[in-house]
Amino acid sequence: MNKREYKKFCKRYDKFINNNLPTPFWDDERQVQEYVYFYNGKSFFNMEIAKDELNVYSNLSDALGDIAFTSFYYPFTASHIRCWKDEKGKIIREVVTEHSHSHSFEGVVESLYYSPETFNISKDEESYYSKQELEYLRRVQKYLLFIGMKDITLKKDSKRYSNAKHSKYENALIYEFSDFTLNKIMNGERDFRVIKWFPEYTNRIYKPKEYQALVVDKDDNFKMFIEFTNEEVKLYKDIKKLCDNNFNDNDKVILIHFKILEVFS
């Protein structure tokens, strides 16, 4: 839009000009939630020129961070497309891998999504993240690499978002098995997942492709693709040699049996 159109577009925010805290605003036309307020000029220099400046954010954490004069900091390394103009004014674009940071966790996830091969958080930078944030990033990165996602390139590739391998596994749950359990399965000693018995239990036989899962180890490395077939109830003492659960001997447990469809190296 041109300058005149933009000025007209912004007039819809005039009703918030006396609000000095972020105000929720739902844009029906664009179907987006925004947080609007007029900046009071706070800065290192407290510049008068910045007073009553319109600010519109898509998330509340940025808006509140602005007025509380604070922000998040998430460091990482990843590839991204860098653009600049040469001495003749020509726009140059190239993919570079370098250290970077984001002021939101969403920004970190975005960088991971576009650069799953090169995305990395060094050990000395993990302290900037919570345990669950690191776990989330690790699991998502492992999955993106498993389905063959590559780092972004200068060439626009619509096929990037129509992944054939993801189509094969997108309805499968993801279960973590211990090394002990994985060894028992690979040795042919065990073909079931164990869960605690519950009073509403009804024995089930599964239809083909009805209940499938990808199996990962404790580090989220993909180990196998399985399909569950049927269930039965046992006392834990009867199968505990094949398990490393913390059930009591006389506890009822449900064995959900499966067959292995694929093993990943």
Image (cartoon, grey):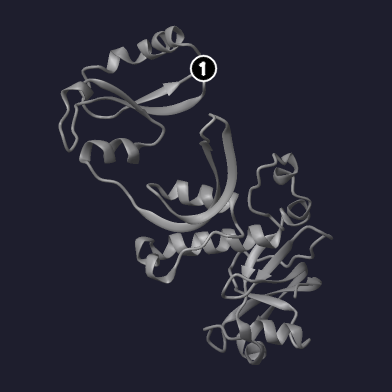
Compare residues 208 and 218 and report the one nearer the observer: 218
Q: Is residue 35 left or right of residue 108?
A: left
Q: Is residue 171 above or below residue 217?
A: above
Q: Is residue 246 left or right of residue 73?
A: right
Q: Which residue in the protein does label 1 denote?
A: 29
- Furthest-bottom residue in view? 241
For the point 28% across and 41% down, which residue is it?
65
- Percent from the top left, x then y, of residue 246? 52, 84
- Furthest-front residue in view? 87
Q: Is residue 250 above or below residue 46?
A: below
Compare residues 211 and 67 and report the one nearer the observer: 67
Res. 8 image quadrant: top left
- Percent from the top left, x then y, of residue 97? 54, 55
Residue 90 showing in the rendered view = yes
Residue 235 showing in the rendered view = no
Res. 76 image quadrant: bottom left
Compare residues 54 and 171 and report the one nearer the observer: 54
Compare residues 165 and 187 and report the one nearer the observer: 165
For the point 77% across and 55% down, which residue is it?
165
For the point 62% across and 83% down, which residue is it?
179
For the point 63% across and 68% down, which residue is it?
175
Q: Is residue 12 left or right of residue 135?
A: left
Residue type at the position of mark 1 = Glu
Q: Is residue 207 left or right of residue 72?
A: right
Element under label 1? loop
